[in-house]
Structure formats: C-alpha cells, structure tokens
Image (cartoon, grey):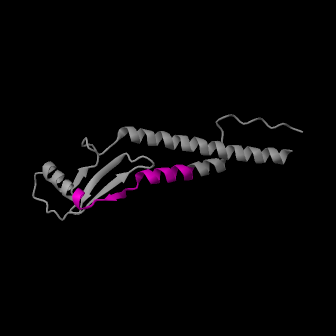
Amino acid sequence: MIDTPKRRFWQIHLSTAVVLMLVSGAFLGANCLERVTERYDETQQAQLNYAFRMRQTVGEYPTSHTFVCVTNGWPLQFSGRIVDEAGNVMPFYAWGNEWRNDWLVLNVLLGIALCVVTATICERLIRREAANHEA
C-alpha cells in the first residue's frame, strides 16, 4: 500500500474554502448594511432638535422633526449617526465623531477569529471522515 504524503498545515480543502467564502461574505454584509437601531420619543426629540440647532447654523428646525439612529457594524456598532426626516445628519457618538475605530478593529479581529474557527471545524470534520474511510 502506498502512503500518501501528509498535507501541510496551511493547505485546506476546496469545500472549506467555499464555506469560508460564505461565512466571510455574511460577516462583511452584516457589517456594511445600515440599520435603523432606535427611534426617539418626544423628550429625546426636543433634545436632538436643540442639538441640531446648536450644530448647524442654517435655518430653524421645527419641534416636529422625527429622528432615527442609523448604525453600521455587527456585533459592535462602529459607525453611527442621527438623521432627521429632512436628511440632516449629526454624529451619533458624544465626542462628535461618526466612527469608533477601536470597535472597527475589534470587528475585524472577530471576523478573522470566526474564519479561523470555521476553517478548523470544517477541516477536522473532513479529516475525521477521511480517517473513517481509510479504517
């Protein structure tokens, strides 16, 4: 019986690559899609109206504006902004930036970890099945 050479550590099966492509695509899609995460009540509406008037000097905003919070990122929301019905935008985070770079880096690291765990599970299942067929 001819012994087949053992695979190197970094080589993966085609089926594992396809699963990794699907997992990374789903993770990327979840991070890129914008979601409306919160609608504000009347008290918060008045506070946001005041904040809009303080930030933007053009025109007056009526108190009947409707505000929503639009965010990006999963599982951590790394980007967010508050939008009114006229399309005016105010940063979501208190320090005036629309981006949380630390959460963006954590999302990237979580995506890499998810791909590594998925590849490890797929390869172990495939190699266990191959070992069962040889025995």
The answer to whether residue 63 is seen in the rendering is: yes
- Residue 10 magenta: no
The correct choice, above or below, for 82 with respect to 6 in the image is below
Could you tell me which residue is drawn at 67 percent across and 34 percent down? 9
Please name whichever residue, 130 or 11, is drawn nearer the observer in this view of the structure. Answer: 130
x and y percentages locating residue 30 in the rendered image = 45, 53
Considering every residue shown, the one lying at the far right of the view is 1
Could you tell me which residue is drawn at 51 percent across and 52 percent down? 25
Please name whichever residue, 102 or 123, is drawn nearer the observer in this view of the structure. Answer: 102
Q: Main secondary structure of the magenta part?
A: helix
x and y percentages locating residue 82 in the rendered image = 27, 54
x and y percentages locating residue 89 in the rendered image = 23, 54
Could you tell me which residue is drawn at 56 percent across and 53 percent down? 22
Marks counted in the figure total 0
What are the residue bounds of the magenta stretch? 21-44
Q: Is residue 53 left or right of residue 98?
A: left
Q: Is residue 45 left or right of residue 105?
A: left
The correct choice, above or below, for 16 with respect to 36 in the image is above
